[in-house]
Image: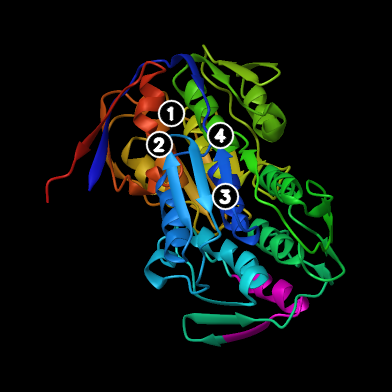
């Protein structure tokens, strides 16, 4: 058990390079199963979730190693399609293995996945999509068994543009016989990255980034080398942190086009943002202005994964702001923790009414999930005094050594063991 200790009140300044996207790397690691041989992936962050996925691949029989930001996966030795229950409980993204294992073996046994407790996240859209491709599914309590005699292309309409379901169906359809069309598909950049990786292996997919994706089944895939896109949520977290601390930072190796909605919101609250190719400069020397309404929604709208971070900034703004969460009903757990630091936030159903205060104050708080933890880090950086954040294993799921990243920007932030 570890905790983060932050001495707040220092404006962030300096420059850093953003690491690769966890939410792109995880499905790509799963997809590697479909092509026998050795894959080499670059710009992979060193995170708890990545470690869990690599351990799952090893348990299935692959040889998987990470050295810095480079991961190599040799899938030629894979021998099992039974995902260990204890590893599935640790990470929801293990569900991405359904499509690839069905493609490789025609059978997969798995369990209901775990992950952050941010609300109900059913996998019914994954299962319905796979059934449309010819998969027989049996559920025995928490155990799910999927089997097919051969995947067949199909027309699939998603009731909701689920990122995970879109990616799982894409992977299962790559070597299915015929053509698969996914309508009302999710449009996130990570889906485009998965399409690019699959096509690099020899798949025939078009449309990722739009609401209609077309997959023409192929008979064979080849292993490849590939570079993961930068993490837009880590980028956004740093941008909001700079604004909350009234700092000025430069972020290298980013994709500004993946952050259009955040950039628009930050400019509305008075943050100065300059963009040049893969560089974003953020400067905020005055108190932010309140914003009438921000609504989370599927990409390209404002991302739910940046809602809690932005709420910290709005809690320091001049006036009343309203944030509406439409994706996860359990995504306001950070509100009580921010209140310990002096924030004035009232929650009514899926809306949070944020009345800005002049400053936040250091306190002992708990990270209830990954993005709530990131929000508390921003609050600690901006607060007067010392902030102690507990349960930081949640933060380590999505941020590669977050204390090192912010210390490079002038923060005073340290990790300590918790004595039990």
Query: What residue did someone put label 4 on?
Result: 320
Query: Who is closer to the viewer here, 119 or 415?
Result: 415
Task: Tell me the distance, in whole angstroms, between the alpha carbons under discs 2 and 3.
Answer: 50 Å
Q: Earlier in the sequence, mark 1 or mark 4?
A: 4
Residue 216 place in picture, x, y as percent? 85, 61
Query: Who is closer to the viewer here, 265 or 48?
Result: 48
- In this figure, which colouring scheme has been used for the structure? rainbow
Lateral position of residue 296 relative to residue 243, left or right: right
Disc 4 + disc 2, Cβ < 8 Å: no
Task: Tell me the distance, in whole angstroms, between the alpha carbons under discs 3 and 4.
Answer: 54 Å
Residue 339 place in picture, x, y as percent? 36, 41
Q: Earlier in the sequence, mark 4 or mark 2?
A: 4
Secondary structure beneath dot 4 equals strand
Q: Mark on residue 357? A: 1
Query: What residue did someone put label 2 on?
Result: 343
Q: Earlier in the sequence, mark 3 or mark 4?
A: 3
Can residue 317 be seen here? The reply is no
Residue 174 place in picture, x, y as percent? 76, 62
Counting other residues with Cα less than 10 Å from the Cα at mark 3, is it few (<14), some (14-19), or many (20 or more)?
Answer: many
Task: Tell me the distance, in whole angstroms, between the alpha carbons under discs 1 and 4.
Answer: 10 Å
**What is the magenta range?**
123-138
Q: Earlier in the sequence, mark 3 or mark 1?
A: 3
Task: Tell me the distance, in whole angstroms, between the alpha carbons under discs 3 and 1.
Answer: 54 Å
At x 47%, y 34%, the residue is 312
Disc 1 + disc 2, Cβ < 8 Å: yes
Lateral position of residue 125 relative to residue 374, left or right: right
Q: Is residue 37 magenta?
A: no
């Amino acid at each position: 058990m570890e905790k983060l200790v932050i001495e707040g009140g220092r404006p962030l300044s300096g420059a850093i390079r953003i690491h690769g996207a966890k939410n792109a790397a995880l499905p790509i690691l799963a997809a590697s199963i479909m092509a026998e041989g050795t894959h080499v992936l670059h710009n992979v962050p060193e995170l708890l979730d990545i470690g869990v996925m690599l351990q799952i691949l090893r348990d299935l029989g692959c040889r998987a190693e990470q050295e810095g930001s480079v991961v190599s996966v040799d899938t030629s030795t894979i021998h099992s399609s039974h995902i260990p229950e204890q590893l599935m409980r640790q990470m929801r993204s293990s569900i991405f293995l359904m499509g690839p294992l069905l493609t490789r073996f025609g059978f997969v046994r798995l369990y209901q996945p775990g992950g952050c407790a941010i609300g109900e996240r059913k996998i019914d859209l994954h299962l319905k999509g796979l059934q449309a491709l010819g998969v027989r599914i049996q559920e025995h309590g928490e155990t799910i068994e999927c089997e097919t005699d051969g995947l067949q292309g199909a027309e699939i309409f998603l009731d909701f543009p689920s990122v995970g379901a879109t990616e799982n169906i894409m992977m299962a359809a790559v070597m299915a016989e015929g053509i698969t069309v996914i309508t009302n598909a999710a449009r996130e950049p990570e889906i485009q990255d998965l399409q690019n990786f699959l096509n690099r292996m020899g798949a025939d997919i078009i449309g990722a980034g739009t609401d209609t994706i077309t997959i023409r089944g192929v008979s064979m895939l080849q292993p490849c080398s590939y570079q993961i896109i930068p993490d837009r949520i880590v980028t956004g977290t740093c941008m909001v942190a700079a604004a909350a601390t009234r700092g000025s930072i430069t972020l290298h190796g980013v994709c500004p086009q993946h952050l259009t909605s955040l950039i628009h919101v930050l400019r509305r609250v008075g943050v100065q943002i300059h963009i040049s190719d893969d560089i974003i400069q953020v400067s905020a020397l005055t108190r932010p202005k309140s914003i009438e309404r921000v609504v989370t929604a599927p990409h390209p709208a404002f991302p739910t994964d940046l809602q809690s971070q932005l709420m910290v900034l709005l809690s320091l703004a001049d006036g009343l702001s309203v944030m509406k969460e439409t994706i996860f009903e359990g995504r306001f757990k950070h509100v009580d923790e921010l209140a310990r630091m002096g924030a004035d936030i009232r929650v009514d159903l899926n809306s949070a009414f944020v009345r800005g205060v002049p400053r936040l104050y250091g306190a002992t708080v708990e990270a209830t999930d990954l993005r709530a933890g990131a929000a508390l880090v921003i609050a600690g950086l901006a607060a007067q005094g010392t902030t102690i954040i507990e349960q930081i294993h949640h933060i380590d799921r999505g941020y590669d050594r977050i204390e090192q990243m912010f210390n490079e920007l002038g923060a005073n932030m340290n990790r300590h063991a918790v004595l039990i």
